[in-house]
Image (spheres, rainbow, N blue to C red):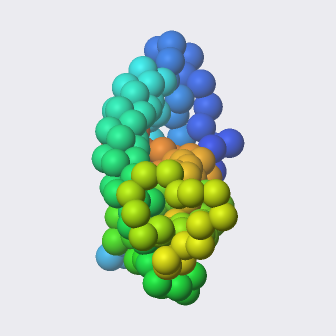
Amino acid sequence: MLAETPRAAFVESDLHEGYRIAQTQSYYAGVVHRWLIVHSEELRKAASERLERHLSLREKELGWQLSRLSHKTFACRADAFQAAEAFAAEHLEKHHRLDDPQNVRVARYAKRGRPAKGAQPEEIRYGIKAKLKRDEAAIVERSWSARDDTSWLPTSLRRERS
């Protein structure tokens, strides 16, 4: 029901600063129900801070996992992209995505250390280079749809007698 209530329906409360109120109705089991939806700016700030902490912690964890993926090498480009897609499907939630994943050519030489001038690589392998990016549209959508800053107050509508 909250998703159906547009932001423009909320009006500033005259009685309490920092609160916005919307009124809506629903029809269930032959009865009309009236709802007052109360939005608190203070609770919105607290919910926003909680979400930011969650996203920051998740980004650290995902950055570490992405770093591990970037150190792996694959036999062909298709395998490298498949690994990136599998990483995204397994680890990325709706708030993050891989930004511009690229194939990186990795040459392997017979000996350790810096190869001699003109040395031919023993093997060519491929890796993934990508950055983690927040999906801001999903974050805004989540903050509006979760509504940790909203209270629902059921009220009754009295039938008018004729």
**Which of the pair 65/24 is nearer the observer?**
65
Q: Is residue 142 above or below residue 55?
A: below
Judged left or right of residue 63, residue 162 is: right
Q: Is residue 155 above or below residue 138?
A: above
**Which of the pair 10/142 is nearer the observer?**
142
Q: How many marks?
A: 0
Judged left or right of residue 56, residue 129 is: right
Q: Residue at x 44, y 60 (%)?
A: 70
For residue 31, say whether it is visible.
Answer: no
Q: Is residue 16 above or below residue 96?
A: above
For residue 132, say whether it is visible.
Answer: yes
Q: Is residue 13 above or below residue 27?
A: above
Judged left or right of residue 39, residue 137 is: right
* Quarter of the image where one finds residue 93: bottom left
Q: Residue at x 53, y 29 (%)?
A: 20
**Which of the pair 111/35 is nearer the observer?**
111
Q: Position of residue 109 (x, y in %)?
A: 47, 68
* Quarter of the image where one finds residue 104: bottom right
Q: Residue at x 54, y 67 (%)?
A: 106
Q: Position of residue 24 (x, y in %)?
A: 51, 52
Q: Position of residue 155 (x, y in %)?
A: 35, 46
Q: Residue at x 34, y 48 (%)?
A: 64
**Which of the pair 101/59 is nearer the observer?**
101
